[in-house]
Every structure is written in structure tokens, then in C-alpha cells.
Amino acid sequence: MERQELKRELDATLEARRELGCEYESALVESFVEKVDTQVRRRLAEERLGAARGGSPVAGAGVGPGPGPGAGAVPGSGTFGERFGFAIVTLVLAVPLSAIGATQARLSGLVVVWAGIVAVNLVHARLPRGRTRGVDGA
């Protein structure tokens, strides 16, 4: 259901850009990014709540009996779940950004957009993962 909502939002954003023109492009992109960010945050909160209640989070199913030291990683705690989610969000955002870059500056615009996407993912992958201490109760 959420995927369909995002697709409708993206379609609406692209249609609004066609109607309004380039002047409102950054505001439209910012609005869409905010909606995607809200959905990602909600999904991460739901996964954390499920893990805190002793449920088996989707990405960590079969890891261990419950959250605790050595029981496995909780998605969204700076581990695979967060990195994977971040990569998915950047790829979803790559679609409209690629279209905008290619429309405005042809191949050079497309190259700049994808260089930015790769750079953002590399920086995120190299960030320190110090936020995981509070998750397992240590």
C-alpha cells in the first residue's frame, strides 16, 4: 500500500512540475523528499516497536529469540537495515532527479545527479555507527 502511495505522490509531483515549470522545482522535490522521509521514519519506528515488544522484525527474522546482547541487529540501528533503507530511498529519489537532470542539462546533468547519489551513499556508508549502544540495553 505504501509503495502505491509513493508512486501516486511521485506522479503528482512530476505533473505539478510540468504544469508549474522550473521555478517551483526545488520546492516540489523538497516536498516529495519530506513525504518519503516521513514514510521511512514511520516504517523504522514500527520495526523498532516490533523488535522492542519481542516480535521478529522483518529484516531480522530468524536471528535470535529477541532483542538483547548477541541476539542480532535491530533494523534501523546503524546496521544493514538502516543502510539498505537509505540506499532504497536514494534510488527512489534517483528517478525524478535523473529525469530533471537529463531534461535540464542532458548527459552532463545525468552524470552529476548520479555522482551525487553515489557520493551520498558512500558518505552514509562510512559514517560511524555509534548509535547502536542504546538499542540492546548496554
Image (spheres, rainbow, N blue to C red):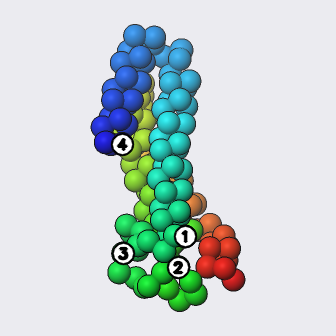
* Label whose residue precedes the other's in the sequence (4 or 2): 4
Residue at mark 1 to residue at mark 3: CA–CA distance: 14 Å
Q: Secondary structure at mark 1?
A: helix
**Among all residues in the image, which is located at the extreme bottom?**
70
Nearer the camera: disc 4 or disc 2: 2
Pointer 3 residue:
61
* Label whose residue precedes the other's in the sequence (1 or 4): 4
Amino acid type for the residue under numbered disc 3: Ala
Amino acid type for the residue under numbered disc 1: Ala
* Label whose residue precedes the other's in the sequence (3 or 4): 4
- Residue toward you, 54 or 22: 54
Pointer 4 residue:
2
Q: Residue 90: x and y, percent?
A: 45, 49
* Label whose residue precedes the other's in the sequence (1 or 3): 1
The tag on residue 52 is 1
Pointer 2 residue:
67
Nearer the camera: disc 1 or disc 4: 1
Could you tell me if the residues under marks 1 and 4 are in contact, i.e. CB atoms within 8 Å? no
Q: Secondary structure at mark 3?
A: loop
Q: Residue 49: x and y, percent?
A: 53, 62
